[in-house]
């Protein structure tokens, strides 16, 4: 039996080696911890009475789509693993601990136990390094996974039955400018794509962040009280709708071009480079995005969006 399983493994490796790896889906996956809190999974200690259904139901539909897609690994770019020297990749097969949101410990205390595709992470790190990007593998077994990674991954794949790779966000916008962030994120995305194609694996990319990110500074007594929930101000809403309209029309080059101004005007989490990275790794799609939902969380604008390279499975959702 062991010999038989070994032969199957070798056959799979050989088969993958014959084909070029590819990105099978790209997801814009906002990570307010409120969404996990509202779902009441067993991994999260606090209990809620629901809330933010527009986003959660949109996520639920996208998660069902993912169940129908054949993929090997989910690669997440998160703004909440901020690195000031280089770009870092998770570099151990397993990470397990308790993640407590530093701002909302009352709603997010999540016990995680996740698997990492170290082989592909190392290939991405090497490809990025070869492109002149400063990189490092995270091999500290006590490293705590950020809540952005956990929230986006849980909402997209609550069974956690696929390995992941998390990529940190280098603070290019803070050190330099939004324009430099765009260029660096593009270079990283192209380097990651080379590693994916070399690996022979099918990959889902995840850009974990909100859109507009001005938020309230006080919390309602009941966090899930939807009578208190609305966008921070109208200008944030107008900017978000402009971006979503261009996504729906397949104008991602234009979206990337105005990203620095959008980020400055709305304090958007796009400042970390996640969306620019993902679009570069997908060749800057010119086809319509699938819009699954938009809703505010503590005043921030959040959209669940997907880009499906397969025209046969691409759909108009909203």
Image: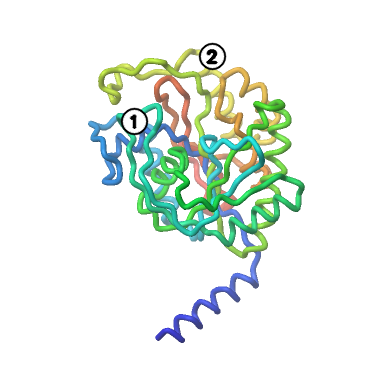
Name the one closer to the observer, 8 or 238. 8
Would you identify the image quadrant in which residue 16 lies?
bottom right
SS type, badge 2: helix
- For disc 1, the marked residue is 105
Applied colour scheme:
rainbow
Tag in front: 2 or 1: 1
Q: Residue at x 51, y 57 (%)?
A: 92
Judge the density around disc 1: few (<14), some (14-19), many (≥20) Cα neighbours within 10 Å: few
Would you identify the image quadrant in which residue 292 lies?
top left
On the rendered structure, is 41 left or right of 114?
left
Q: Residue at x 45, y 19 (%)?
A: 215
Q: Earlier in the sequence, mark 2 or mark 1?
A: 1
Residue 208 sits above or below residue 102 on the image: below
Q: Residue at x 70, y 25 (%)?
A: 177
- For disc 2, the marked residue is 235
Name the one closer to the observer, 53 or 196. 196
On the rendered structure, is 197 left or right of 141?
right
Would you identify the image quadrant in which residue 195 lies?
bottom right
On the rendered structure, is 299 left or right of 184?
left
Q: Residue at x 45, y 48 (%)?
A: 142
Residue 45 on image: x %, y %: 26, 39
Residue 293 on image: x %, y %: 43, 33
Q: Are marks 2 and 1 in contact (CB under 8 Å)?
A: no
Residue 211 sits above or below residue 201 on the image: above
SS type, badge 1: loop
Residue 41 on image: x %, y %: 28, 44
Residue 17 sits above or below residue 5 on the image: above
Q: Is residue 204 visible?
A: no
Judge the density around disc 2: few (<14), some (14-19), many (≥20) Cα neighbours within 10 Å: few
């Amino acid at each position: 039996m062991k010999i038989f399983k070994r032969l199957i493994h070798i056959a799979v490796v050989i088969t993958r080696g014959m084909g070029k790896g590819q990105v099978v889906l790209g997801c814009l996956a906002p990570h307010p911890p409120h969404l996990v809190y509202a779902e009441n999974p067993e991994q999260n200690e606090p209990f809620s009475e629901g809330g933010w259904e527009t986003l959660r139901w949109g996520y639920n539909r996208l998660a069902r789509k993912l169940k129908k897609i054949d993929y090997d690994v989910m690669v997440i770019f998160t703004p909440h693993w901020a690195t000031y020297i280089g770009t870092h990749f998770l570099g151990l097969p397993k990470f397990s601990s308790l993640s407590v949101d530093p701002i909302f410990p009352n709603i997010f205390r999540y016990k995680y136990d996740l698997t990492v595709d170290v082989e592909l992470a190392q290939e991405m790190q090497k490809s990025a390094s070869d492109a002149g990007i400063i990189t490092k593998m995270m091999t500290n077994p006590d490293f705590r996974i950020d809540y952005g990674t956990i929230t986006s991954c849980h909402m997209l794949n609550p069974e956690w039955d696929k390995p992941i790779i998390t990529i940190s966000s280098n603070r290019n916008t803070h050190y330099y400018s939004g324009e430099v962030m765009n260029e660096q994120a593009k270079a990283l995305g192209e380097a990651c794509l080379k590693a994916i194609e070399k690996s022979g694996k099918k990959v889902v990319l995840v850009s974990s962040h909100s859109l507009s990110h001005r938020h309230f500074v006080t919390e309602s007594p009941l966090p899930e009280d939807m009578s208190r929930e609305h966008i921070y101000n109208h200008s944030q809403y107008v900017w978000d709708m402009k971006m979503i309209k261009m996504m729906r029309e397949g104008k991602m080059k234009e979206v990337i071009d105005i990203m620095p101004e959008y980020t400055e005007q709305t304090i958007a989490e796009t400042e970390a480079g996640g969306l620019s990275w993902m679009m570069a790794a997908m060749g800057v799609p010119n086809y319509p995005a699938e819009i699954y939902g938009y809703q505010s969380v503590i005043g921030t604008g959040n959209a669940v969006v997907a880009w499906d390279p397969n025209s046969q499975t691409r759909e108009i959702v909203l």
